[in-house]
Amino acid sequence: MKIAFAGKGGTGKTTLAGAMITLLARHRKVLAVDADPNSNLANVLGIPNGSAIKPIVEMRDLIYDRMEIKPDITPGPVPGSFYKLNPRIDDIPEKFMRKRNNVNLIVMGTVDAGGSGCVCPESTFLRELLKHLVLNEKEDIVMDMEAGIEHLGRSTAGSMDCLVIVVEPTLTSIETAGRIKRLAQDLKMNTRFIGNKIKTKQDEDFIIKKLGEGTILGTVSFYQDMNRIDKGGSIMDLPHDAGILLEVDKILKSLTKMESSDEQKKVTG
Amino acid sequence: MKIAFAGKGGTGKTTLAGAMITLLARHRKVLAVDADPNSNLANVLGIPNGSAIKPIVEMRDLIYDRMEIKPDITPGPVPGSFYKLNPRIDDIPEKFMRKRNNVNLIVMGTVDAGGSGCVCPESTFLRELLKHLVLNEKEDIVMDMEAGIEHLGRSTAGSMDCLVIVVEPTLTSIETAGRIKRLAQDLKMNTRFIGNKIKTKQDEDFIIKKLGEGTILGTVSFYQDMNRIDKGGSIMDLPHDAGILLEVDKILKSLTKMESSDEQKKVTG
């Protein structure tokens, strides 16, 4: 499975992506991709010194070097000949990854200095890399997108199997989710909603009423003890029976079922 | 004053920007600028149908038209000759603004379709417009930035007097604030922190410990009744003595004092 997490800032994208990575990594190998220039996934996974991870965009320069292409002469995506290699996760050089148990974390890249420009080159390289990356059947990709909608203009997650859109019981997060869904449809992407930080039955009803019955993959409760995570703890270090992990596990099972039924339809249809 | 609000997604940038706009607009004229492609400022200000506001980037095309310049031949920022006009707020055509009381709201522009590209052209035009916009002494600008840090690469708020960075009592929002401050320093911008959603003395201490004593302009409490705003209410419709408005008013007074003392220093220094 290749899953990307999107949504308004602060809805809990990174937390839920971290929970899903934790769950998948119990039995499988996971490539965790932090596609947010304001990266936080390393924190949530308890991988120290995340901001020191060499961004994957620098792999482009490495490839250019090997091919003796100068980036200032051939800007934009890596030339097609690279993709003929159909890289696997194991082909990504160690220096661009940080490992923890079954998780390999890569980061897209960020803004290095004020006024130094946008993250378009980083987004383009990541999009093209993911498009050509080959997974074996014991491997998954979980990607945490930046807040908001710009990544959909760039189609960074365009090759993912599913875009999970996280909402909380606020109107602005639900409006953002609607925008994300519309833009993802332009890209012919599968989308699913998750309701997060649910405190009351009214919260759940509010989300269902706004997004429509039957559109929601599942909901996750508001956890007061997430305070510990907010203050610097990690999802991967939670006990196996932590409430949030149990709830996300249920969602993961629905998602796996849906994806395999979609796959079935593709095969038989 | 020209103030921009930045911070991690979900910290309350738009809410606090909306509160400041509401307070300033009691006595002055405010240009409210929504520089987030995932725009929400209209909601917070109770301006209906915000997503239908014509984005200011289309003014560029209007100018190009008048100058008989074709955007596909002359891309990027508007040519210098336009700026010789030194536009005032009143020079912005009505169709790009939505008014409510003393507030004029403009929106930067957004992603129209999945895969249609980034918001670099929108950001560039807004940056250049703000750089050349002339305010009279009864006018202020309050701008709500997109979540995260990419706008600092683009220097969209580069001409503002002050970048207010909103944090909540979470490690990730404080790390984001640190990144924003560093990037803003590259742009030689003034920055100030506001602590938001403070529930306990421990929350306040956590923020102060992480950001450093004396660096925080002020704090705003967590308001349970903000739930109403979250579910679709507007800050501008709160009663004058609403707690959040009283707290933001205190912050506004500190900010005004600091800015005028900075101004004094510039004059006498």
Image (cartoon, coloured by chain):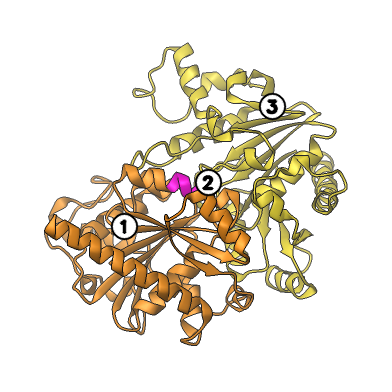
Chain colours: A yellow, B orange
**Secondary structure under badge 3?**
strand
The part of the image, by quadrant, that contains residue A106 is top right
Residue A166 vertical placement versus A51 (above, below) = below
Q: Which mark is residue A99?
A: 3
Crowding around mark 1 (Cα neighbors within 10 Å: few <14, some 14 to 19, many 20+) is many
| Residue B176 magenta-highlighted | yes
**Secondary structure under badge 1?**
helix
In the image, the segment drawn in magenta is B174-180
| Residue at mark 2 | B175
Q: Gap between marks 3 and 2, in whole Å?
A: 22 Å
Q: Which mark is in front, 3 or 2?
A: 2
Going by the numbered disc 2, the residue's amino acid type is Glu
Residue B142 image point, x, y percent: 35, 67
**Residue at the image point whose x is 28% and y is 59% from the top:** B161
A85 vs A7, nearest the viewer: A7
Q: Gap between marks 2 and 1, in whole Å?
A: 27 Å
Q: Which mark is in front, 1 or 3?
A: 3
Residue B138 is left or right of residue A92, and the answer is: left
Q: Which mark is residue B210?
A: none
**Secondary structure under badge 2?**
helix
Q: Gap between marks 1 and 3, in whole Å?
A: 41 Å
Going by the numbered disc 1, the residue's amino acid type is Leu
**Residue at the image point whose x is 41% and y is 51% from the top:** B119
Earlier residue among tags 2 and 1: 1
Going by the numbered disc 3, the residue's amino acid type is Lys
Residue B238 showing in the rendered view? yes
